[in-house]
């Protein structure tokens, strides 16, 4: 499949490829130059919670279960 580069440097990805690759409006594509070839890859979605995992601290160094029991009045 072929596509032309517009004056703005834009390229239309053919619909058949968009459908096959799951490219939807808003999909981020990373471009690289590999041995003189333009290569585009869908950017992997980052887990928005990943950077926060393990960062929280409970008061008094208690366990999660203990903290929940105390906060619920049990």
Image: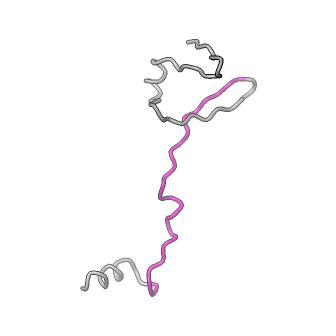
**Would you place residue 15 above or below residue 21 in this image?**
above
- Residue at x-position 65% and y-position 17%: 7
Q: Is residue 64 magenta?
A: no
Instruction: Pick out the residue farthest to the left.
Output: 74
For residue 1, above or below residue 74: above
* Residue occupying the point 47% across, 29% down: 23
Q: Is residue 25 left or right of residue 28?
A: left
For the image shown, how many numbered marks are present on the structure? 0
Residue placed at 46% from the left, 31% from the top?
A: 25
Q: Residue at x 48, y 73 (%)?
A: 56
Q: Picture quarter containing residue 28?
A: top right
In the rendered image, residue 42, in percent from the top left (x then y), is placed at: 54, 35
Magenta-drawn segment: 37-61
The quadrant of the picture occupied by the N terminus is: top right
Quadrant holding the C terminus: bottom left
Residue 69: % across, % down:
29, 82
Q: Residue furthest front?
A: 8
Measured as percent of width and height from the top left, residue 71 is found at: 31, 82
Q: Is residue 50 magenta?
A: yes
Depicted 21 relative to depicted 67: above or below: above
Q: Position of residue 41 (x, y in %)?
A: 58, 33
Residue extending farthest to the right is 35
Q: Nearer the viewer, residue 37 or 71?
A: 71
Is 72 situated left or right of 26 in this image?
Answer: left
């Amino acid at each position: 499949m072929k596509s032309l580069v517009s004056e703005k440097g834009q390229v239309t990805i053919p619909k058949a490829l968009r459908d096959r690759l799951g490219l939807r409006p808003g999909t981020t594509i990373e471009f690289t130059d590999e041995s003189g070839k333009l290569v585009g890859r869908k950017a992997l979605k980052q887990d928005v919670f990943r950077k926060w995992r393990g960062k929280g601290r409970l008061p008094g160094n208690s366990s999660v279960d203990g903290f929940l029991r105390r906060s619920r009045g049990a």
